Image (spheres, rainbow, N blue to C red):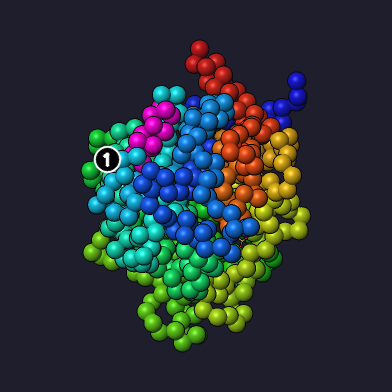
């Protein structure tokens, strides 16, 4: 018997109904990009355009989960997950993005996934949109167009109506920050636009409007029948000042957090508007740069539901942290970074796992959880993503990732037990190696390895998967003992 690397996770610190999960996203796993009536999404277009993704790889096949769902289910059961987070491909259900035409094969597929999960006592958490906007909607302006809120709301209602008798945990959109910043500011993600300092805020705004509309629809028409919960998944780094004795760095650190997390969390959980720091900085920069075409950071209209109060829990995606230095007086062009006036750097002592942006600092997760508790009025928190990537030769004996999960779950347990943070669940990113967006298949985050070199796409558990399963199983045993 090998020594267990996760044996020290104090399972007794986790509540009995804690959600032990893993997460995936449709475009990253499903493949069958044009099978059975699926319409294209912006990620299909983006990958097919060449030059955008590592080695021009695509999600055309990915893990082929559209055909191999039962293999995924085996992985889920082998881990003993209590929850599984998946996303729906909007254009598989609604090929042109609207409810004018519903693709019955898409409905059948997700019904099977959801029913199989429930038959095995695994609770689904379903994300309505994880980056893969229908291309037909992009052609009408996509997230930049104000009408998207209405179209998204119709899609959301359709999903609540179709799947909501069984799905009780919903995420409207995944990571509006990443979608807006990488999709419209840097062009790293679909739709690949580089429109610095303008579209990013418009897209973020319309995502918030769309989310708020969908939450209100659920609240008014479905909650009393279905009794579920709806939120929006927000990614955030943890930030701390590079020089703690510099008031400029301290202020920049707050701005850094405000421009990532506060941008969305403040409207939803705090004030119903963007953080004051964002408004102030952006207005000051408009004057400085002589920019006069509109407010850039839009205002929430009185004529539609405000985002305040439109989340039934806090959904956090956490990966990494930064030390922040003030750059507010550096000259710069119109851009999000320039507005933020803060630069995040890595501490040279922090180890990097795989991807260059991913410094491994699990202990900062506890700080971020406490920050959320203090700043956003002690919400119930689900960690909807967190993980560790591998690059280079495949190592099924992924001791470093095991250590990462050990350290992370230790931090979560302390946040719960010692700090009183209401953490309700943890979703490892990700169930299995998959299409890591612009990085293609070279970065592997899975608890299962997927062999992309043959058509079988065989799933094999990593050591970390086995160890995560052991933690979940120990928690189950602990609950049984407590009950007797
Ligand atoms: C999440 O996105 C996604 O929800 C998930 O689908 C994804 O697989 C997972 O995280 C792992 O990445 O510093 O210029 O190199 C996170 C998206 C993309 C955010 C890369 C940070 C760094 C770009 N991340 N980005 S750069």
Looking at the image, which residue is at 31% across and 37% down? 164
Q: Position of residue 261 (x, y in %)?
A: 50, 58
- Indicate the quadrant containing the N terminus: top left, top right, bottom left or bottom right: top right
Total numbered labels: 1
Question: Which of the 4 image quarters holds residue 228?
Answer: top left
Q: Is residue 137 visible?
A: yes
Quadrant of the displayed image that contains ligand 1 = bottom right
Q: Is mark 1 on a helix, strand or loop?
A: helix
**Nearer the observer, 230 or 393:** 393
Looking at the image, which residue is at 28% across and 46% down? 102
Residue under label 1: 161
The crowd level at tag 1 (other Cα within 10 Å; few <14, some 14-19, many 20+) is some
**Nearer the observer, 458 or 265:** 458
Left or right: 103 as drawn, with respect to 241:
left
Q: Position of residue 326 (x, y in %)?
A: 62, 71
Left or right: 139 as drawn, with respect to 301:
right
Q: Can residue 414 be seen in this view?
A: no
Looking at the image, which residue is at 75% across and 26% down? 3
Whether the magenta-drawn stretch holds residue 312 is answered as no
Work out whether 85 lies above or below 192.
above
Question: Which of the 4 image quarters holds residue 386?
Answer: top right
Left or right: 68 as drawn, with respect to 293:
right
Q: What stretch is highlighted in magenta?
A: 106-118
Whether the magenta-drawn stretch holds residue 108 is answered as yes
Q: Where is residue 472 in the image (x, y as percent from the top left)?
A: 57, 27
Asked whether mark 1 and ligand 1 are closer than 8 Å, the reply comes as no
**Residue at far bottom of view:** 290
């Amino acid at each position: 018997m090998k020594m267990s690397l996760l044996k020290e996770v104090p399972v007794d610190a986790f509540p009995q109904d804690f959600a032990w999960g893993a997460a995936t996203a449709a475009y990253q796993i499903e493949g069958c990009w044009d099978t059975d009536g699926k319409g294209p999404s912006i990620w299909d277009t983006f990958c097919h355009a060449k030059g955008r993704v590592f080695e021009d790889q695509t999600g055309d096949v990915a893990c082929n989960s559209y055909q191999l769902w039962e293999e995924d289910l085996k992985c889920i059961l082998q881990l003993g997950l209590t929850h599984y987070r998946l996303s729906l491909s909007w254009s598989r259900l609604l090929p042109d993005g609207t409810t004018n035409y519903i693709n019955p094969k898409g409905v059948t597929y997700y019904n099977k996934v959801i029913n199989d999960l429930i038959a095995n006592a695994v609770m689904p958490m379903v994300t309505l949109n994880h980056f893969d906007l229908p291309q037909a909607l992009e052609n009408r302006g996509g997230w930049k167009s104000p009408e998207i809120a209405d179209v998204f709301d119709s899609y959301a209602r359709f999903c609540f109506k179709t799947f909501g008798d069984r799905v009780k945990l919903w995420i409207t959109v995944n990571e509006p920050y990443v979608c807006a910043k990488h999709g419209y500011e840097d062009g790293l993600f679909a739709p690949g636009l580089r429109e610095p300092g303008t579209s990013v805020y418009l897209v973020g705004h319309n995502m918030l409007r769309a989310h708020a509309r969908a939450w209100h629809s659920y609240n008014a028409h479905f909650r009393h029948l279905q009794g579920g919960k709806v939120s929006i998944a927000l990614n955030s780094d943890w930030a701390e000042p590079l020089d703690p004795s510099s008031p400029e760095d301290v202020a920049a650190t707050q701005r850094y957090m405000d421009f990532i997390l506060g941008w969305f969390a403040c409207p939803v959980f705090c004030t119903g508007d963007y953080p004051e720091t964002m408004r102030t900085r952006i207005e000051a920069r408009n004057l400085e740069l002589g920019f006069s075409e509109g407010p850039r950071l839009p205002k929430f209209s009185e004529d539609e539901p405000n985002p305040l109060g439109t989340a039934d829990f806090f959904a956090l995606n956490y990966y990494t942290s930064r030390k922040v230095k003030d750059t507010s007086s550096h000259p710069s062009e119109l851009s999000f970074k320039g507005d933020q006036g803060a630069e995040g750097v890595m501490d040279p002592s922090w180890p990097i796992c795989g991807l260059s942006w991913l410094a491994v600092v699990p202990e900062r997760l506890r700080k971020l959880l406490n920050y959320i508790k203090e700043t956003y009025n002690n919400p119930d928190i689900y960690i909807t993503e967190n993980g560790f990537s591998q690059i280079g030769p495949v190592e099924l004996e992924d001791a470093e990732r095991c250590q990462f999960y050990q350290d992370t779950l230790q931090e979560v347990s302390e946040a719960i037990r010692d700090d009183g943070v209401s953490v309700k669940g943890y979703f490892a990113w990700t169930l299995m190696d998959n299409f890591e967006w612009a990085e293609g298949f070279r970065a592997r985050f899975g608890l299962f390895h997927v062999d992309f070199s043959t058509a079988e796409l065989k799933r094999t558990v990593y050591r970390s998967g086995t160890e995560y399963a052991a933690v979940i199983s120990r928690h189950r045993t602990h609950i049984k003992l407590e009950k007797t």
